């Protein structure tokens, strides 16, 4: 069975072997909500997929895109979805938000490392997403280790947790940061930890910044035991 969820997903849950992240570009904040509602209605109404744990939708704070993040038990289940189920799911969404959604593909990831920076994890709805291009698996792992080290040492105010993902093909790192609110996320850019991250990126061979975004959680669905 599946059910709607009104809080962000638990990224570091142990049964999530792989994750799929995609960006859907839309032309207004209203269509952000419409695209997310269509996707989650499709999953809630048509039943669950083998190996799927959860799907979550986030709206970019600039009103221009929707981030989709799904968790899967294993790579085989995810590959089956991409090859067999995903095309019909996207057709369902496009019928309800016609001409409004532009997609640039999705990338499969695994969570490589997580760090929880608060003893008590408060409710939150703000997420910072940064994507890096990387030159192979060794560069991925080395860069993730450095990011975790910098954040644990600096412990930016308002940062709840950080989850570093590596793409299965070795070409991407996805940084997923949980923030108490958008103000804390904005203030981080002025901190020494933020400046150290930029210096670290400049010193990291085989790593290049691709995109940075701020998102608020919209809604999600997940397996109900």
Image: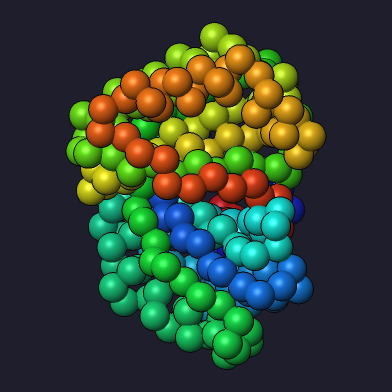
Q: In front here: 100 or 18?
A: 100
Q: Colour mode? A: rainbow
Instruction: Locate residue 217, reporting x and y percent.
Output: 69, 52
198 to 56, vertically: above or below: above
Q: Quadrant of residue 116?
A: top right
193 to 85, vertically: above or below: above
Q: Residue at x 48, y 26 (%)?
A: 198
58 to 102, vertically: above or below: above
Q: Residue at x 45, y 20 (%)?
A: 199
Q: Quadrant of residue 162?
A: top right
Q: Is residue 71 left or right of residue 125?
A: left
Q: Is residue 115 left or right of residue 190?
A: left
Q: Residue at x 37, y 32 (%)?
A: 112
Instruction: Locate residue 80, reporting x and y percent.
Output: 29, 67
Q: In front here: 220 or 188?
A: 188
Instruction: Locate residue 122, reporting x and y percent.
Output: 76, 30
Figure quadrant of the N terminus: bottom right
């Amino acid at each position: 069975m599946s059910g709607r969820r009104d809080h962000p997903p638990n990224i570091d849950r142990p049964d999530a072997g792989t994750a799929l992240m995609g960006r859907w570009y839309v032309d207004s904040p209203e269509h952000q909500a419409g695209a997310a509602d269509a996707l989650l209605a499709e999953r809630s109404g048509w039943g669950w997929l083998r190996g799927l744990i959860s799907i979550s939708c986030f709206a970019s704070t600039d009103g221009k895109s929707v981030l989709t993040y799904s968790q899967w038990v294993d790579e085989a289940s995810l590959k089956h979805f991409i090859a067999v189920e995903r095309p019909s799911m996207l057709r369902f969404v496009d019928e309800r938000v016609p001409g409004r959604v532009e997609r640039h593909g999705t990338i499969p990831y695994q969570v490589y490392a997580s760090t929880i920076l608060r003893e008590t994890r408060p409710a939150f709805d703000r997420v910072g997403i940064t994507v890096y291009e990387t030159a192979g698996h060794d560069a991925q792992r080395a860069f993730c280790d450095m990011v975790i080290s910098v954040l644990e040492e600096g412990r930016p105010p308002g940062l709840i947790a950080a989850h570093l993902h590596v793409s299965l093909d070795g070409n991407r790192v996805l940084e997923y940061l949980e923030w108490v609110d958008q103000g804390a996320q904005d203030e981080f850019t002025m901190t020494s930890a933020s400046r150290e991250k930029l210096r670290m990126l400049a010193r990291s061979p085989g790593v290049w910044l691709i995109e940075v975004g701020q998102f608020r959680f919209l809604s999600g669905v997940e397996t109900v035991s």
